[in-house]
């Protein structure tokens, strides 16, 4: 039996959704999970080529969410390990909006080492599988120190879709293959 989780991905097929970038990458913070965040006051983001998406990967692949999605994620996140850092995104066409950098204060130990496929040469993850015992009570988490991934439970995934907070977003399924080991019938 499998149990799905979902990774947030930008939907390149959605031609109406814009992307959030910066006119000056030198001022962009390179934010990594489990590390202290320092943001320069001169950091500016701009919406380009479309309307404001619910989620985007901003400069240096930081996770950016709009106000509504942030509020929903906050309801499900472990508050001591997830913070939402406000930034302003500018748009001449749609007006300025508040967005939030989703920053995890830790890297969650969720990888199913037995079923995840790793690159033989680099050890990097090719196909992620999560361990049921480690994720069964989580709804919002990350999985790796180098990749700014954002993974949500099926319950939260359905709520995001129900509230239509998936504009410009697609979801990649992440499977939990070892659930049967932990669930008794």
Image (cartoon, helix red, strand yellow):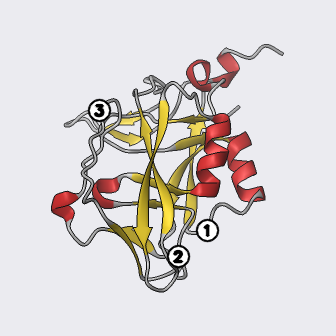
Q: Residues within 10 Å of mark 1 (few under 14, many from 20)?
A: many
Q: Is residue 1 above or below residue 44?
A: above
Q: Tell me the CA gap for discs 2 and 3.
A: 31 Å
Q: Is residue 138 above or below residue 57?
A: above
| Sequence-wise first label, 3 or 1 | 3
Apparent side of residue 50 relative to residue 139 in the rendered image (left or right): left
Q: Quadrant of residue 176?
A: top right
Tell me the element at label 3: loop
> Which residue has dot 1 on it?
167
Considering every residue shown, the one lying at the far bottom of the view is 93
The residue located at (31%, 64%) in the rendering is 44
- Residue 95 visible in the displayed image: yes
Give 91 or 153, whichever is nearer the viewer. Answer: 91
Report x, y in % for residue 56.
Answer: 46, 61
Q: Nearer the viewer, mark 3 or mark 1?
A: 3
The residue located at (50%, 78%) in the rendering is 95
Tell me the element at label 1: loop
Q: Nearer the viewer, mark 2 or mark 3?
A: 3
Apparent side of residue 181 relative to residue 134 in the rendered image (left or right): right
Considering every residue shown, the one lying at the far right of the view is 185
Q: Tell me the CA gap for discs 3 and 1.
A: 30 Å
Q: Residues within 10 Å of mark 3 (few under 14, many from 20)?
A: few
Apparent side of residue 59 relative to residue 13 in the rendered image (left or right): left
> Which residue has dot 2 on it?
17
The quarter of the picture where the N terminus appears is top right
Report x, y in % for residue 129.
Answer: 50, 34
The quarter of the picture where the C terminus appears is top right
Circles 1 and 2: CB distance less than 8 Å? yes
- Mark drawn on residue 36: 3
């Amino acid at each position: 039996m499998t149990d799905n989780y979902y990774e947030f991905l930008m939907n390149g097929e959605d031609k109406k959704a814009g992307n959030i970038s910066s006119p000056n990458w030198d001022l962009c913070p390179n934010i990594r999970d489990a590390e202290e965040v320092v943001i320069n006051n001169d950091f500016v983001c701009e919406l380009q080529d479309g309307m404001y998406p619910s989620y985007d990967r901003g400069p240096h692949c930081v996770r950016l969410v709009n106000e509504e999605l942030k509020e929903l994620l906050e309801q499900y996140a472990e508050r001591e390990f997830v913070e939402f850092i406000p930034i302003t995104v500018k748009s001449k066409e749609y007006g300025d909006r508040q967005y939030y950098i989703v920053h995890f204060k830790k890297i969650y130990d969720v990888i199913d080492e037995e079923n995840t496929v790793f690159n033989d040469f680099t050890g990097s993850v090719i196909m992620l599988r999560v361990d049921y015992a480690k994720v069964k009570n989580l709804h919002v988490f990350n999985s790796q120190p180098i990749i700014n991934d954002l993974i949500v439970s099926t319950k939260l995934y359905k709520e995001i879709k129900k509230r239509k907070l998936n504009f410009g977003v697609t979801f990649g399924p992440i499977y939990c293959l070892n659930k049967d080991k932990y669930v008794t019938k």
